[in-house]
């Protein structure tokens, strides 16, 4: 297991590589080259330069989060092959710079969704929050661009106001796609890219839908144990894996995260581990990682991962904003550093006890 932190390059992150390096037990970052239009090849020289910048701080760049999948691939359009070719070329380049794991998602049109990026808790910290009725009201088919601007100019990925018209058209398009067709579009993509991922030594890790339920009538498939089984059965390739995002799947009280981790942990190259506080079946606040702060049992999750033979990367996920920090929502330093060391502590305790039991 390797503990890493997500980090955004080119001055786009208030957290520095130096700070990450000083966080005990963190060996590297999950990063990306932002602003490459979806569907274009990630240039090898830019990847080499980024890797060198990260290596200057003694950190590894073994995980990329994310290379986004072009909407034409998700829609299953005839034009998809050209974008798949570009994806394959990007995989080659990632392999050439030593990337071992690629997080991506197949969420149609929008990435994750929240109603509030700075919801204040009684202790004065802020977290990201989700109220289903409010998010449902942000439907791009009916809302204005201004409504989509959130917290200090940060937009949710994929929710940029200038994309609004296209979003509305895309959402309508998906209304005519059945879940069967959507599964077939995922499989078409996997069959095309996994051979290159294998050849490049990269494990691909699909990110679950966040939230894991229907929104704007869009297909949501990576959202339950049953559907994760279906996804993993699409290809037995060792390069076909899951990002176990405990907060995304765990937003639904119906998902038993330790059970999922126990069953599929060996096919999880990357785990995003965070806690959530359920307010109802569809409303939640993100929470500090520590088990009593939320509704997910972090010990059970880490134990299940350990027992499953999990041998991947873990990163703490969205943290609260604490101690006056101003940062990209969810991605400040302080609460994620606390989370990382809490998770490392659980992992150390579990592995030490298991070793002693064997003696
Ligand atoms: C949210 C993240 C997601 C994730 C992508 C992966 O904080 O977990 O944006 O990076 O869905 O493709």
Image (cartoon, rainbow, N blue to C red):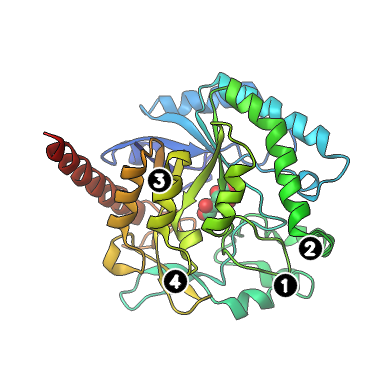
Q: Circle 1 sits in a helix, a strand or a loop, which is it?
A: loop
Residue where numbered disc 4 is placed: 285
Establish whether ligand 1 lies closer than 8 Å to the Cβ of label 1.
no
Spatial CA distance of label 1 from label 3 is: 31 Å
Occupied quadrant, residue 189:
top right
Residue where numbered disc 2 is placed: 171
Residues at circles 4 and 2 in contact by the CB criterion of under 8 Å:
no
Spatial CA distance of label 1 from label 4 is: 21 Å
Q: Quadrant of the C terminus?
A: top left
User: Considering only order in the chain, which callout, 3 or 4, is on the residue closer to the N terminus?
Assistant: 4
Residue where numbered disc 1 is placed: 139
Q: Percent position (x, y) of residue 353?
A: 16, 43
Q: Percent position (x, y) of residue 34?
A: 62, 41
Q: Is residue 37 visible?
A: no
Spatial CA distance of label 2 from label 3 is: 31 Å
Residues at circles 1 and 2 in contact by the CB criterion of under 8 Å:
yes
Instruction: Give the number of callouts.
Output: 4
The answer to whether residue 187 is left or right of residue 344 is right
User: Considering only order in the chain, which callout, 3 or 1, is on the residue closer to the N terminus?
Assistant: 1
* Residue closest to the eye, 142 or 297: 297
Occupied quadrant, residue 32:
top right
Q: Percent position (x, y) of residue 143?
A: 75, 74
Occupied quadrant, residue 208:
bottom right
User: Considering only order in the chain, which callout, 3 or 2, is on the residue closer to the N terminus?
Assistant: 2
The answer to whether residue 109 is left or right of residue 235 is right
Q: Circle 3 sits in a helix, a strand or a loop, which is it?
A: strand
The 10 Å Cα crowd at callout 3, few under 14, some 14 to 19, many 20 or more, is many
């Amino acid at each position: 297991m390797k503990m890493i932190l997500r980090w955004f390059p080119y001055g786009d992150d208030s957290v520095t590589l130096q700070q990450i390096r000083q966080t005990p037990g963190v060996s590297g970052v999950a990063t990306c080259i932002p602003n490459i239009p979806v569907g274009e090849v990630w240039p090898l020289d830019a990847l080499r330069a980024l890797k060198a910048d990260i290596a200057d701080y003694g950190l590894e760049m073994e995980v990329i989060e994310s290379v986004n999948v072009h909407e034409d691939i998700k829609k299953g359009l005839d034009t998809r092959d050209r974008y798949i070719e570009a994806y394959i070329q990007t995989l080659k380049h990632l392999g050439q710079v030593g990337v071992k794991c690629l997080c991506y998602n197949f969420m149609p049109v929008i990435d994750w969704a929240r109603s509030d990026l700075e919801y204040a808790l009684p202790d004065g910290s802020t977290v990201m929050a989700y109220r289903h009725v409010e998010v449902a009201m942000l439907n791009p088919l009916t809302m204005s661009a201004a409504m989509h601007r959130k917290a200090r100019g940060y937009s949710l990925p994929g929710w940029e106001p200038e994309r609004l018209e296209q979003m509305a058209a895309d959402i309508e398009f998906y209304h005519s796609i059945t879940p069967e067709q959507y599964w077939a579009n995922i499989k078409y993509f996997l069959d095309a890219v996994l051979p290159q991922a294998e050849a490049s030594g990269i494990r691909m890790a699909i990110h679950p839908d966040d939230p894991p339920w229907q929104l704007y009538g869009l297909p949501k498939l990576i959202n339950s144990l049953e559907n994760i089984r279906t996804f993993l059965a699409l290809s037995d390739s060792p390069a076909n894996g899951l990002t176990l995002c405990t907060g995304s799947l765990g937003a639904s009280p119906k998902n038993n995260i330790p059970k999922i981790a126990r069953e599929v942990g060996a096919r999880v190259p990357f785990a995003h581990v965070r806690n959530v506080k359920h307010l109802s079946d569809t409303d939640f606040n993100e929470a500090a990682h520590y088990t009593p702060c939320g509704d997910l049992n972090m010990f059970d999750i880490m134990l299940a991962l350990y027992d499953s033979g999990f041998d991947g990367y873990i990163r703490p996920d969205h943290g609260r904003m604490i101690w006056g920090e101003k940062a990209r929502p969810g991605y400040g330093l302080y609460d994620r550093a606390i989370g990382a060391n809490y998770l490392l502590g659980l992992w150390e305790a579990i592995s030490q006890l298991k070793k002693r039991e064997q003696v």
